[in-house]
Amino acid sequence: MSRQLLAAAQAVRGVLTGLSLSESLDRTPPALRPAAQALSFHAMRQLGFAQTARALLVPRRPSDRLTEALLLLGLSLLEASQRQSDGTAQPPGTPLYAAHTLVHQIVQAAESDRHTRPAKNLINAVLRRYGRERTALLPQILATPLACWNHPDWWIEALQQAWPQHWEAILQAADQPPPMTLRVNVRQTSRDTLLERLAHAGITAQPVGIAGLILDRPLPVRDIPGFAEGCWSVQDASAQRAGALLPLQDGMRVLDACAAPGGKTAHLLERHTLRLTALDSDARRLERVDENLRRLGLESPDVTLRCADAADPAAWWDGQPYDAILADVPCTASGVVRRHPDIRWLRRAEDVARTAALQTRIADALWPLLAPGGHLLYATCSIFPQEGESQIQAFLDRHADARRLPAPGQILPGGADQGDGFFYALIRKPENTAL
Ligand SMILES: C[S@@+](CC[C@H](N)C(=O)[O-])C[C@H]1O[C@@H](n2cnc3c(N)ncnc32)[C@H](O)[C@@H]1O
């Protein structure tokens, strides 16, 4: 257990130094990875609480980041166990240990690494003190929004302003583990057939959307039949909406402008036979589009992958207009913090305006590429209006010919289909527009 705790603390240290949690976990030895992931996800979801508690107990932030990470991990785990003992049920999957075992194992973990060894006694003393004085400390800790909501102050304030009726529910949903949702590849199988196949393997699921299945219990991909055969992909219910929103017909010329890793590209191709260009500015991510299309049996001479900047069509566009464009633009990913609990700690307030400016450049650059009568679907997995509703209002103001059609607009996380936070706007270019 102490090796798992140390591996998790190393992943937490990665985030404290600016790496994404998945990048940090990629460095974890495979045998330790599942446990390190569960532990570090928990630490991310309780990081505001743990940081506030740490600041009260050790006013000077430890200079060594691994020592800090181990302390934060220990405090977050200790608190979860205490809440469970107090009768407050913890979210499914929360790692729970008896307090004395936990403290002992954290100290063992500290002993086992040269960075943390000098702070072994400090870590032991802090965790034991927290155990003894928790009742007195809790009101002070929970008086801060950071500890109460486990998000940075700027993020909480942005949500309060944008969603005065919903911000608390949004923040609570962010700390619930998300469901595992599959998208059935209807070119390979039907949803009913896959449901039967899953049932034979003892897996139960509920239909969602046009081709989705929410598993009653998340499982490793390898334990679900049909993946290698391309019968399904993992894709959140909100992300699956894109496939049905863009009005497409076989034979259309389509641009997926920010395509990688290809979840929505594949969905479009599962539903229609298209002349499609999948564009992305990140060559490594574009390789994943290729892998996914191959696995799903969707590669075709009519599907082209292109590494290029969507905001600079002069560098790659052949001058032929598109019947439909999907612009699933880069965003702050504020709608998917359930799946990526580190995002909130890595983003800075100024990233929202910076990302929105990039989205504006991409949307404006793509608009002239759309044929008269064509449709642009703008999508983001963000819940900040600067990247959604305000972005689209400003787009409509700049492009007098753009007509907005019905589409979900802002989807808040954890709604009826348990999907992520997303924003969709569907915009049509009238037939009589000059190119
Ligand atoms: C939200 S993700 C796309 C997810 C994808 N549509 C899917 O469903 O799997 C945004 C993508 O935009 C890409 N991107 C960022 N800036 C870009 C640009 N200027 N031009 C094209 N792609 C860009 C990123 O590399 C990233 O893969």
Image (cartoon, rainbow, N blue to C red):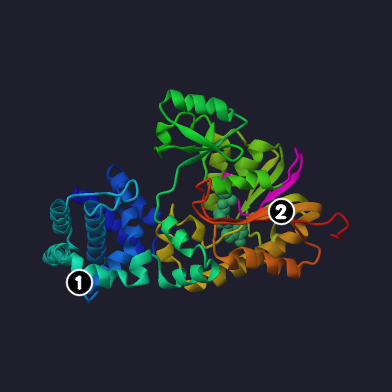
Name the residue: 73% across, 45% down: 247
* Residue 86 circle label: none
Name the residue: 71% across, 65% down: 364
Looking at the rendered image, the quarter that the C terminus falls into is bottom right
The region drawn magenta spans 247-263
Residue 432 image-quadrant placement: bottom right
Residue 431, how many percent across, how many down? 86, 54
Q: Residue tagged by mark 1?
A: 57
Residue 132 image-quadrant placement: bottom left
| Disc on the earlier residue, 1 or 2 | 1
- Magenta stretch secondary structure, dominant: loop
The amino acid type found where label 2 is placed reads Pro
Q: Is residue 17 visible?
A: no
Q: Is mark 2 on a helix, strand or loop?
A: strand
Is 258 contained in the magenta span? yes
Mark 2 Cβ inside 8 Å of ligand 1? no
Is 132 contained in the magenta span? no
